[in-house]
Amino acid sequence: MISRLANPARFMRSSAAALPWCGWSAAGVLAVGLYWALVAAPPDYQQGEAVRIMYIHVPAAWMALGVYLFVAVASGVALVWRHPLAEIAAAAAAPIGAAFTFVCLATGSLWGRPMWGTWWVWDARLTSVLVLFFLYLGYIALVNAFDEPSRGAKAGSVLALVGVVNLPIIKFSVDWWNTLHQPASVMRLGAPRIDVAMLVPLLVMAAGFLLLFLALLMLRMRAALNERKALALRLNSDPAPARVAGRERAVPAHRAVGSGGQ
Amino acid sequence: MTGELGRYLAMGGYAVFVWPAYGVTLAVLGGLAWQSWLRYRASAGALERLQREFRTRR
């Protein structure tokens, strides 16, 4: 069932239909979320207007963790079932996760300066997120270090799976160690400790980031599939062009018919 | 700058932290989206050219 849905040709068709919807809804939700975060949401009684950084910092942090989990699960599927789409998905998601992690670190630093009086401290939460950022960079470098895409993907998958141990460390670092970073306000057992007037724009921004991730994931997977197909065409072009097509048709049917008479 | 807009942009004295935070986010995520789009366009164009070349050779 899953392998039927995850067939590359089928993915190209369904993502072509889903991508515009996903991209435009991401833009729309983010526009609403930004207005809410920057204008409509109230200032904090202690932090004043600086609390507005939260609306990008916290969703970016959620995405940094969530995307890493996605990369790790896709890597596991690629290693165990050797599914080509899984390794392409993992490799396509990693730069997006790295971008979210960087946004999380940068905005956290800009928030820490006025609230804590420092841009950076080497405490458990901040350091473990920095490690996450380096895991992303290491994964990306490893995947691109091989001429043959699938060999790079295999090496990267192992790194991605090993790096999973960092996720619970990040999540529980604020509970296990006494850090400058505050503990969770939303992702905790029991009701969120945050007012609805701030929780709603926060969740809207998180939804916008999630939609943006899905749109960019599909776009980057489509690009990677195009590149692999072009590589296969070029490698096999001399002996037998027909064999290249493999599971997919190298030439779309309507074009093949059109060129047949020429 | 004075008036309502100036007061808004000042962000209660936190302007130098709030606006760069949103600026960095826009630059990083916008840059990634732009790069992804360019890469997709380039990959689709290259594949199209290869496939056309293929057909003429056959």
Image (cartoon, rainbow, N blue to C red):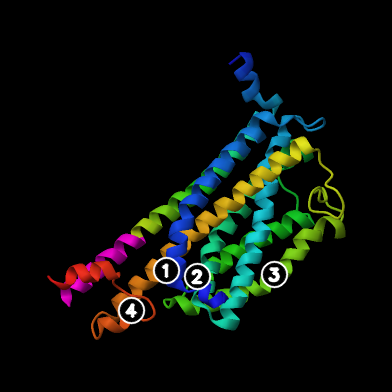
- In-front residue for pair A35/A178: A35
User: Residue A202: horizontal and vertical position, in percent?
Assistant: 70, 42
Earlier in the chain: of badge 3 and badge 2, it is: 2
Instruction: Identify which amino acid the numbered label 1 is placed on.
Output: Leu
Give the x, y percent position of residue A207: 64, 48
Q: Is residue A35 magenta?
A: no
Q: Nearer the viewer, mark 4 or mark 2?
A: 4
Q: CA distance from mark 2 to mark 1?
A: 8 Å
Q: Which comes sooner in the sequence, label 4 or label 3?
A: 3
Question: Mark 2 — on which chain does it sit?
Answer: A
Callout 4 touching callout 2 (CB < 8 Å): no
- Vertical side of A97 occupied by A200: above or below: above
Work out whether B15 lies above or below A116: above
Q: Residue A225 has which mark?
A: 1
Q: Amino acid at mark 3?
A: Val
Q: Quadrant of the C terminus of chain A?
A: bottom left
